[in-house]
Image (spheres, rainbow, N blue to C red):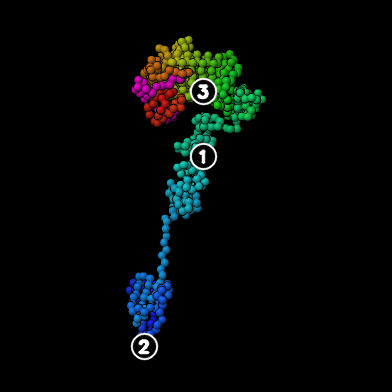
Amino acid sequence: MTRSTLISITAPLCLFLASCNGTPPIETASDTSNESETDDSTTDGTTSPGTTTLTTTATTTTTTMGTTATTTTMGTTASTTQSSTTVETTGPMPDCDAANGTPDDKCDASTPFCYEGECVDCQGAMNDAACEGLDPNNPVCSNEGACVECTTDSAAACSGSTPVCDDAAHECVGCTEHSQCSTACAADGSCFSEDYVIYVDKGAADCMVGDGSEAAPYCTLAEAFNKIAEPDNLAAMWTVKIKIGTYTATENITPAGSMIALIADGGPVIIRSTGDGAAGITTGDASTLYTSGLVLSLNDGSGLKCAGSTVYAADTQMKSNQMHGVETIDCTSSYKRSLITANKQGGVASYGPGKTTIRNSYVTVNGNAASEFGGIRSAQMNDLEVVFSSLIANDGGMVASLQCIDGGAAEIRNSVVIGRTNNPSVDCASAVVSYSVVDGGDQQGDGNMLASDMEVKLWWDNPVGGVYHVKGLVDDLPSPIASVAMWMMGDPAWDYDGDPRMASEGAADFPGADVPPQ
């Protein structure tokens, strides 16, 4: 009887792989005896990892790169199978590893925040909270995903002298309009305090017992002025909100040394003084007055009289007064989007040191053959600036549009100066007139165009209440004056009616207070 002895080496796969590095494969040692008996131990043919299986196969196979090693000796097969494992990683590697919503140096400037392993902008992080942590000076997350100083929806960061958000630049800027404040806009760009507001409403049921609050308004301006004149109140900047209506009194004089903004609230407010020679509103000495939405009309004196004070009038009308629309003595005054019309003794009379500024406004149909001047008189070293304004159809026994007597500097730019008569339209030795439509005179500067009262009838619509709207087309062609004006930085970006101007440095535009609607 012959007995065969099988010696099988079971080893991990790494031992079989050794043959790939020059090491001989593992071999099976065998010897033969004289016995004829054979070991009949077999398996059922299945293979499992880490097990040895004996089969009756007469082949010898060694695999070094796979997972199975098989050795056969003397008709008996030993099969060894070794399992392998593959680890697979999916997805991109993290961009960053900072805490959610915080900056990470691995991120670039456009996406500075880390959020769940990704570099994102503030919209992808925690919006304003992320920006506050990045830069306290730019605490607001814009719709574009950038950290900015402010947006129009998040203007709380804006205060003091820069209370308004310029949404295009996302920067806090000073106010320029009363509508940008809940109170009124001061000349330095700040808003009047909300702590000093008085309400006047003659139509309120209980105004006779009012205290000036919104719930219990005063009936008259005089009551508001009396409260402001109290010693503890005089130093404050007061906003007086006046409801629509006609307010008539013997006189309306602001307290001396006061700072007041008279703001129409809900519609036009007509103010009239009935005293002999009284103006609609007279400023007290050394006071500052702001007006918006007021109509100073049918007064025995002038519409507005300023003495030794400062006036800022916006969207204000001075019309049909027995004297002047505006009369100033030693004052600095400015008028924007205002209408000064049909005043018997002339539109604006400014005397003494100070400056009169007229922008985006109409000075029309003032004076008559019996008045000394029609449109504007600047005298006794008063400086004058007229920009994008219309002086049209004014009349006077001496000068129709502009008269200077011992005057200071005078600049007329991007305007219309056409009188109603053949009298000299401009009599002002110091005047520099440029980029304007004028009806003559010796003071012409750069870019002016000559025209007369006849062209007014052709190039403008018939006036309505002293407002002359310019025609965009004349005989189906562009208006001859469409490109006379030249816009400069700081000029009004809108016309009297709120229509946009070209508003870019050096752009050609219509002169005067009006442009045709787009």
Residue 261, visible in the rendered structure: no
Left or right: 463 with respect to 450?
A: right
Q: Is residue 330 above or below residue 41?
A: above
Percent of width and height locating residue 245: 57, 22
Image quadrant holding the C terminus, namely: top left
Q: 10 Å neighbourhood of mark 3: few (<14), some, or many (≥20)?
A: many
Left or right: 55 with respect to 197?
A: left
User: Could you say which disc has been placed on residue 316 in the image?
Assistant: 3
Identify the residue at horizontal 46%, vertical 10% (top origin).
369
User: Could you say which disc has been placed on residue 293 in the image?
Assistant: none
Q: CA distance from mark 1 to mark 3?
A: 32 Å
Q: CA distance from mark 2 to mark 1?
A: 101 Å
Image quadrant holding the N terminus, namely: bottom left
Left or right: 494 with respect to 292?
A: left
Judging depth in this view, the residue of 329 and 397 nearest the camera is: 397
Region in magenta: 467-494
Instruction: Answer whether residue 108 is magenta in the image.
Output: no
Label located before the other in sequence (2 or 1): 2
Q: Label 1: which residue?
A: 154
Percent of width and height locating residue 177: 50, 30
**Which secondary structure, mark 3?**
loop
Quarter-of-image position of residue 252: top right
Q: Amino acid at mark 1?
A: Ser
Quarter-of-image position of residue 201: top right
The answer to whether the residues at label 3 and label 2 have Cβ atoms under 8 Å apart is no
Q: Amino acid at mark 3?
A: Thr
User: Could you say which disc has been placed on residue 36 in the image?
Assistant: 2
Percent of width and height locating residue 440: 38, 16
Q: CA distance from mark 3 to mark 2?
A: 131 Å
